[in-house]
Image (cartoon, rainbow, N blue to C red):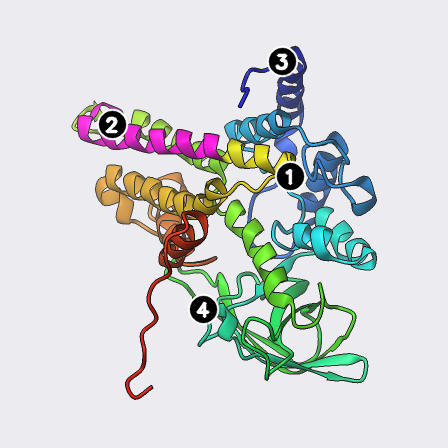
């Protein structure tokens, strides 16, 4: 991998830095909920300048640039350094899935407004009895004329209370083997028969939801891929989701926040950065962040060449989520008794960012496929190790 920056790339970095210096004040505050006017306008500005949806074709709402691994890296790096809300390419799970497997009509209908920030999504995958074994899902869809009629329940559905649309796995062939009877449907969250019930997590916020479907009617053409082949489409989505959960630039940005805090906070007149135990932990995390950063560039290199990244891709989600939680744990530890404060305490540091991330990142080790499932997939699919033996039930 050649990491030398040409004159072109050095000039491009300066261009990004100038844009951020001129427009940083326009960056909206990150918060959950439906996209605000400020967020949509910011997204449009980033697309116009090629800093969001950079390689998505113009006909689907993007900037339409040719892939350039170093330019993409420069954008992510400079936005992270400036602590500016980065642009996006729409939902990082749904948009690339539809671009890869959807029809032309679906790309126009869903990708364009999603990329522009005008349409938000939630994911209907997990069910109360089908989490790690997702293929055992029971939410069903039966074809009635030109419509699917959906009945069932989903759980841990992030953002369902304000999402415009949902991409949802349903069982359409009840007699087929469990991996072969699933279809991937897209429909509006305003469709009659959908009941969303928020779930308050250990962060104190309602991040997740239960979603109930009672005779929800969806046009039959709102299916991605073929009927009964939703497991393949779902795994395409999961591939993009897992990559998004291990963003090395975001990890690097958080690391800088810890360093700044350790330089400014003191105990007994000594800066925390000068404590050898904490500094040792900090340096170990820095080494992991650097390895994660270069592994991410290796994955991008393979993708640009249309090659399968293999093991490099499989480790992204597992490593990224565990690393983020370890950083939050260090931040909580170095704050001492201040690290257990919440809400509106006058001594709260960084608006409680690290307390929230400690809880949320612990959940993300489970979300998108638990760490244990990830390790199984790495062992079996990437390293070619034998599968775990199946337990035979008594009397079978």
Which dot, 3 or 2, sits closer to the camera?
A: 3
Residue at (35%, 29%) from the top-left corner? Answer: 286
Distance (Cα) linking label 3 and label 1: 24 Å
Determine which residue is flagged by label 4.
131
Crowding around mark 4 (Cα neighbors within 10 Å: few <14, some 14 to 19, many 20+) is: many
Q: Is the magenta stretch mostly helix, strand or loop?
A: helix
Q: How far across and down, in percent of the image, does residue 262 sit?
A: 30, 29
Q: Which residue lies furthest to the bottom in this view?
A: 395
Most extreme residue toward the top is: 7
Q: Residue 2 shows which numbered tag?
A: none
Drawn side of residue 73 relative to residue 65, left or right: left
Mark earlier in primary sequence (3, 1):
3
Q: Earlier in the sequence, mark 3 or mark 2?
A: 3
Q: Mark 2: which secondary structure?
A: helix
- SS label for mark 3: loop
Percent position of residue 61, x then y:
78, 44
Q: Which mark is residue 306?
A: 1
Q: How far apart are marks 2 and 4 (CA)?
A: 39 Å
Residue 342's place in the image compared with 258, above or below, is: below
Tell me the mark number nearer the camera, choosing from 2 and 4: 4
Q: Residues within 10 Å of mark 3 (few under 14, many from 20)?
A: few
**Callout 1 crowding tier (Cα within 10 Å): few <14, some 14–19, many ≥20:** few
The residue that mark 3 highlights is: 6
Asked if residue 291 shows in the view, the reply is: yes
Q: Nearer the viewer, residue 255 or 369?
A: 369
The numbered dot on residue 279 is 2
The label nearer to you, 4 versus 1, is 1
Q: Position of residue 184 (x, y in %)?
A: 65, 67
N-terminal-most mark, 2 or 1: 2
Q: What stretch is highlighted in magenta?
A: 273-295
Above-or-below relation of 396 to 46: below
């Amino acid at each position: 991998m050649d990491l030398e920056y040409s004159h072109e790339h050095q000039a491009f970095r300066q261009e990004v830095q100038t844009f951020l210096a001129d427009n940083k004040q326009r960056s909206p505050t990150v918060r959950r909920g439906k996209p605000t006017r400020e967020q949509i306008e910011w997204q449009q500005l980033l697309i116009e300048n090629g800093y969001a949806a950079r390689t998505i074709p113009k006909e689907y709402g993007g900037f339409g640039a040719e892939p350039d691994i170093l330019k993409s890296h420069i954008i992510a790096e400079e936005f992270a350094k400036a602590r500016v809300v980065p642009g996006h390419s729409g939902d990082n799970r749904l948009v690339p899935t539809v671009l890869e497997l959807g029809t032309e009509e679906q790309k126009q209908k869903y990708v364009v407004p999603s990329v522009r920030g005008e349409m938000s999504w939630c994911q209907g995958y997990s069910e109360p009895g089908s989490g790690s074994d997702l293929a055992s899902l029971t939410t069903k869809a039966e074809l009635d004329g030109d419509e699917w009629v959906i009945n069932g329940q989903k759980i841990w559905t992030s953002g369902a209370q304000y999402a415009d649309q949902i991409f949802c796995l349903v069982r359409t062939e009840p007699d087929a083997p469990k991996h072969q009877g699933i279809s991937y449907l897209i429909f509006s969250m305003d469709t009659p028969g959908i009941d969303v019930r928020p779930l308050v997590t250990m962060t104190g916020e309602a991040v997740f939801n239960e979603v109930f479907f009672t005779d929800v009617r969806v046009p039959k053409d709102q299916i991605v891929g073929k009927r009964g082949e939703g497991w393949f489409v779902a795994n395409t989505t999961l591939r993009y989701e897992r990559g998004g959960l291990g963003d090395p630039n975001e990890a690097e940005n958080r690391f800088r926040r810890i360093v700044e805090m350790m330089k400014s906070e003191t105990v007994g007149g000594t800066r925390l950065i000068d404590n050898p135990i904490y500094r040792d932990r900090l340096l170990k995390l820095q080494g992991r962040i650097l390895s994660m950063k270069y592994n991410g560039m290796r994955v991008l290199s393979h993708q640009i060449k249309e090659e399968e990244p293999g093991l490099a891709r499989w480790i992204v989600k597992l490593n990224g989520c565990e690393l983020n939680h370890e950083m939050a744990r260090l931040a909580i530890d170095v704050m001492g008794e201040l690290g257990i404060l919440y809400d509106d305490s006058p001594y709260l540091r960084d608006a409680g960012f690290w307390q929230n991330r400690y809880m949320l990142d612990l959940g993300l080790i489970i979300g998108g496929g638990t760490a244990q499932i990830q390790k199984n997939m790495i062992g079996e699919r990437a390293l070619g190790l034998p599968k775990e033996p199946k337990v035979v039930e008594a009397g079978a």
